[in-house]
Image: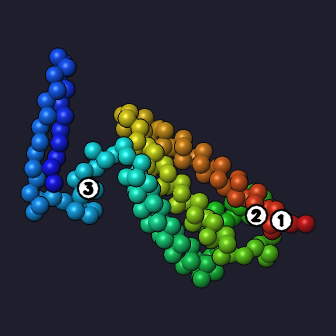
Amino acid sequence: MCQVNLFIDYKANYMLEIKVVPRANRPYGLVALFFERKRMMNSIGYQLFWIILVFGIMFFVYFFLLSKKIKKGNINRIGEFTYLMKRFSLDQKKINTNQIKLGICIINAFIISFVSNFIMLIPVSMMFRLLIGFVLLFALIYALYEIYGKFLKKKYGKE
């Protein structure tokens, strides 16, 4: 495998540098993603990979934590569940808890994966990244739970 670097100096003379990397020294798999992350940071495939990876991890974490709370009978102690019940006046007896659990897991995983990857793409200082991240985080929480609550109200609303 050859690595080709193209350098352009201020006089518009082109210099071509070719490096041959021995096969034993080439990184593969996740190691390659780690070492090549700065070069690949702007590619869409790389960003989609990390969004899907973070989404999957967060989805399973939330899914198992919520499953544990529901099995113990502490469904009213789940903050998102009580918010949806009170805000949209839903009937708790009509609601399928597995559907609510799945919806909450998908929403929370999407919010975390999207915000974390979005703020890493912004080329500003860390203070502004945190500020933009918090604003985006609260905006997505409000917007997505409003949309999900309206969907649930149509399906399970009190009559």
The residue that appears at 10% across and 53% down in the rendered structure is: 21
Mark 2–mark 1 CB contact (< 8 Å):
yes
Residue lying farthest bottom?
A: 71
As helix, strand or loop, the secondary structure at mark 1 comes to loop
Q: Quadrant of the N terminus?
A: bottom left
Residue 102 at x, y percent in the picture: 61, 70
Residue at label 1? Answer: 157
Badge number at residue 98: none
Please tell me whether mark 3 or mark 2 is closer to you in this view.
Answer: 3
The residue that appears at 49% across and 38% down in the rendered structure is: 132
Label 3 to label 1, Cα distance in Å? 48 Å
Mark 2 crowd level (few <14, some 14–19, many ≥20, 10 Å Cα): some
Residue closest to the eye, 47 or 96: 47
Label 2 to label 1, Cα distance in Å? 7 Å
Badge number at residue 34: 3
Residue 7 at x, y percent in the picture: 17, 30
Residue at label 2? Answer: 152
Report the side of 64 relative to 98 (left or right): left
Q: In which quarter of the image is the C terminus?
A: bottom right
Q: Please tell me whether residue 3 is drawn above or below residue 59 in the rendered image.
A: above
- Disc 2 residue type (three-letter): Leu
